[in-house]
Image: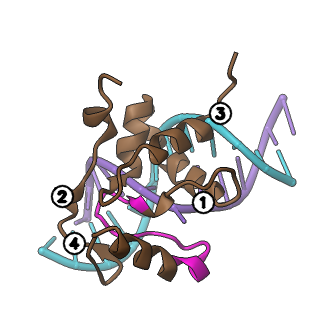
Chain colours: A brown, B purple, C cyan
Amino acid sequence: MAEENFFERVYDVARQIPAGRVTSYGAIARYLGSAGSSRVVGYAMGASLDIHPPVPAQRVVNRNGMITGNLQQSGFKRRVQMLESEGITVEDEQVKDFKTLFWDPATELRSK
DNA sequence: AGGGTGACGACTC
DNA sequence: AGAGTCGCCACCC
């Protein structure tokens, strides 16, 4: 049995986020069936920097569309640039048109 | 086995 | 409307 920890599941979903789109921790948590474990998703993202393969955690922001990241602030700036490189406009550490670029796995991967 | 932590989320004042 | 506080659930020590 594939003993995929909750973290790996989060990574799997995050890797399915198409470029130019963003999602929220709560959306992923909800998609995994643990809507209340949004914090765990965020925690997993932080640990994603230490896992392999790399996870596009930069596409995952909080439900406000703001790029959180108290940790790894060193790479935080780089994350914003990567998002802009994908066509996402980031202003003041916040994703512009977040609602439009929002990619909900519960809706997109509903049948996958 | 227990306690503490944490890239959030929703409620309340 | 904005700011602050509490709660949740999984992982690490």
Amino acid type at circle 2 is Lys
Residue lying furthest top in this view? A1
Q: What span is colored magenta in the figure?
A: A59-76
Of callouts 1 and 4, the N-terminal one:
1
Q: Chain of mark 2?
A: A
Residue pointed to by mark 2: A99
Residue pointed to by mark 3: A5
Disc 1, SS: helix
Of callouts 2 and 3, the N-terminal one:
3
Amino acid type at circle 3 is Asn
Relative image position of residue A15 (x, y in whole percent): 48, 46
Front one among B4 and A12: A12
Q: Chain of mark 4?
A: A
Residue A72 magenta-drawn?
yes
Residue A37 magenta-drawn?
no
Of callouts 3 and 4, the N-terminal one:
3
Please give the name of the residue rendered at 38% of the width and 46% of the height, measured from the top-left corner. Answer: A26
Answer few, some or many: residues within 10 Å of disc 1's Cα (few below 14, many 20 plus, some between 14 and 19).
some
Disc 3, SS: loop
